[in-house]
Each structure stands twice: as C-alpha cells, then as structure tokens.
Image: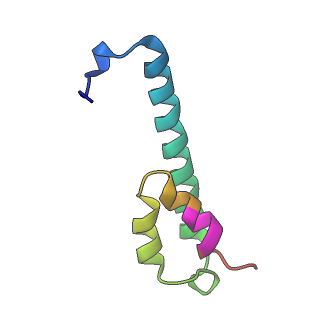
Amino acid sequence: MKSRTWNELTPGRKVAGAVAGTVQICLAAAAWRDLAKRPAASVRGRKAVWAGVIAVNFVGPLAYFTWARLPE
C-alpha cells in the first residue's frame, strides 16, 4: 500500500483523519490532566511511566483510564 500525501486523500478520509487526531489529542490531554492531579498513592505504578504510556496512540490513554487509577 502506497502512502499518500494529505492532498491526495479524499475529503472523507481527510475528515476521518482529523476526527481521529482530535479524539487522540483529547484522550491524551484528559489522561495527562488526571495523572497530574491524582496523588501518586492513587496510581498503580510510577506516574512517570504512565505519563509515557499515555503518549502511545489511543492505547495509552485507554490503558491509563482502565488499569492505572485506583479507586478513591
């Protein structure tokens, strides 16, 4: 599969890419904000490690919200 430049994409694919990018940025921002405000005792593992995990595409923020946070 040949990769295409932005200008070669159809309008529908451009919209899909923009939506996916926006969702990714919003998920990561929400996870980083929660991580910054949450006490270290309320996080499974080291906060620095989770900060790096959150940067990994959609998987990181979803993993953080699923496994890192301890019930308060």
Residue positioned 57% across, 82% down in the render? 44
Position of the N terminus by quadrant: top left
Does the magenta portion include 9?
no
Residue placed farthest to the front in the image? 1
Q: How many marks?
A: 0
Q: Is residue 49 visible to us here?
A: yes
Viewed as shown, does residue 37 lie left or right of 49? right
Q: Nearer the viewer, residue 10 or 61?
A: 10
Residue placed farthest to the bottom in the image? 41
Q: Main secondary structure of the magenta part?
A: helix
Q: How is the image coloured?
A: rainbow
Name the quadrant containing residue 8. top left
Viewed as shown, does residue 64 lie left or right of 7? right
Name the quadrant containing residue 34. bottom right
The residue stretch that appears in magenta: 63-67
Residue positioned 50% across, 35% down in the render? 20
Name the quadrant containing residue 40. bottom right
Residue placed farthest to the right in the image? 72
Percent across and percent down for residue 14 are 43, 20
Percent across and percent down for residue 35 are 55, 68
Residue positioned 41% across, 57% down in the render? 56
Work out whether 72 lies above or below 22: below
Does the magenta portion include 65?
yes
Viewed as shown, does residue 40 lie left or right of 47? right
Percent across and percent down for residue 37 are 60, 69
Q: Is residue 33 visible to us here?
A: no
Work out whether 70 lies above or below 64: below
Position of the C terminus by quadrant: bottom right
Residue positioned 29% across, 14% down in the render? 7
Percent across and percent down for residue 30 are 58, 54
